[in-house]
Image: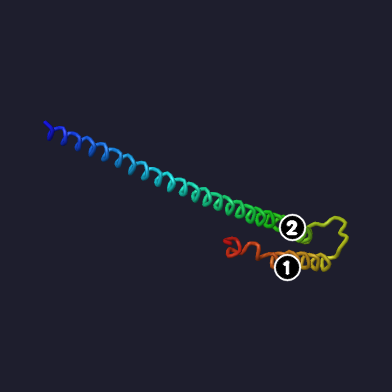
Amino acid sequence: MNLLNYFLGISGITTALIFIAKFVIKWIGDAGIEKYKSELQQETLKYQNGLEKELEEFKIKYNTLHIEQVEIIKNLYAKLIQAEKPLEYLMRPVKLNPDKTKDELAKEVVEKANECFDYFDINEIMFNKVLVTF
């Protein structure tokens, strides 16, 4: 009977120690996992903030680029119209009260067309595919 009590006592103590050790190991493991999870969340947040910042910079760059392109297109169209009007008048078969001779009109058409082409050449870089991909 003494031997039975001894074995029951030893097995009870061993069971309690195993249970406590298992609980401590689980608690330490969970604490490590929670710490690792917290670090991952912080890194994810930093990465997300960096991406959002880059996205805003990208939007600002391209918004500015497109605004400049629209302004250039608007000016180019105006110059094209200014070159087209004297050409259209020069090509009319009937001219009422002409205030300029054909030579003056032809010279004006050439000057306005050259202005239009020069303006396009100066601003052609704004439509360069390499610039747009930056």
- Mark 2: which amino acid? Asn
Q: Are marks 2 and 1 in contact (CB under 8 Å)?
A: no
Q: Does label 2 or label 1 sit earlier along the sequence?
A: 2
Left/right of residue 88 with respect to residue 59 in the rendered view:
right
Identify which residue, 91 or 14, lies in the foreground.
14
Q: Label 2, secondary structure: give it.
A: helix
Taking 76 as reference, is 29 above or below it?
Answer: above
Point 58% across, 63% down: residue? 129
Query: In what quadrant of the picture does the N terminus appear?
Result: top left
Return the mark for residue 75.
2
| Residue that carries the numbered disc 1 in the rendered image | 118
Q: Residues within 10 Å of mark 1 (few under 14, many from 20)?
A: few
In space, the residues marked 2 and 1 are separated at their CA atoms by 12 Å
Q: Amino acid at mark 1?
A: Asp
Residue 64 placement, left or right of 133:
right
Residue under the point 74% across and 68% down: 114
